[in-house]
Image: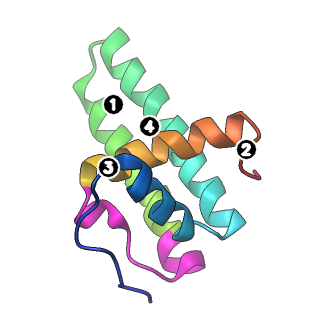
Amino acid sequence: MSYIMPKKFDCFSEFYSFYLTEHTHRTSRRLHVVGTLGAFVQGLSAILWTQPWLAITAIFSAYSFAWAGHIFFEKNRPASFKHPFYSLCGDLALVRDVLAGKITW
């Protein structure tokens, strides 16, 4: 597994460039997109139906899909351990870029 990660990023665009190098495997990207979209739907459902347990399943869903991509396909460590906010933003940017056709589904 690859564990080399810059210690500090000056801005999100620097992090996102790194993020994309850690998500080169197509199946891993798909798992990230499915997990992120699934978590979004579960989170929205938690709010709309006032069901806090759905917020917990949203977090579990997002992380389990993403970590499976890293463990089984990318063979690297998720950046969420050292850069949780940027990682969340990276997941959302990946979804945006896949839906916009900028990154291969």
Mark 3, Cα crowd under 10 Å, few <14 / some 14-19 / many 20+, is few
Q: Quadrant of residue 6?
A: bottom left
Whole-Å distance between the Cαs marked 1 and 4? 9 Å
| Sooner in the amino-acid sequence: mark 2 or mark 1 | 1
Residue 39: numbered disc: 4
Numbered mark located on residue 102 in the image: 2
Camera-near label (3 vs 4) is 3
Determine the CA span between mark 2 and mark 1.
31 Å
| Label 3 vs 4, first from the N-terminus | 3
- Horizontal relation, residue 53 to residue 42: left or right: left
- In the image, residue 17 above or below residue 39: below
- 71 part of magenta stretch: yes
In this rendered view, identify the residue nearer to me: 1 or 53: 1
Dividing the picture into quadrants, the one containing residue 40 is top left
Residue at image x 38%, y 68%? 78
Q: Secondary structure at mark 1?
A: helix
Res 11 label: 3
Q: Which mark is residue 69?
A: none
Mark 1, residue position: 54
Q: Quadrant of residue 15?
A: bottom left
* Label 2 – label 3 distance at C-alpha: 21 Å
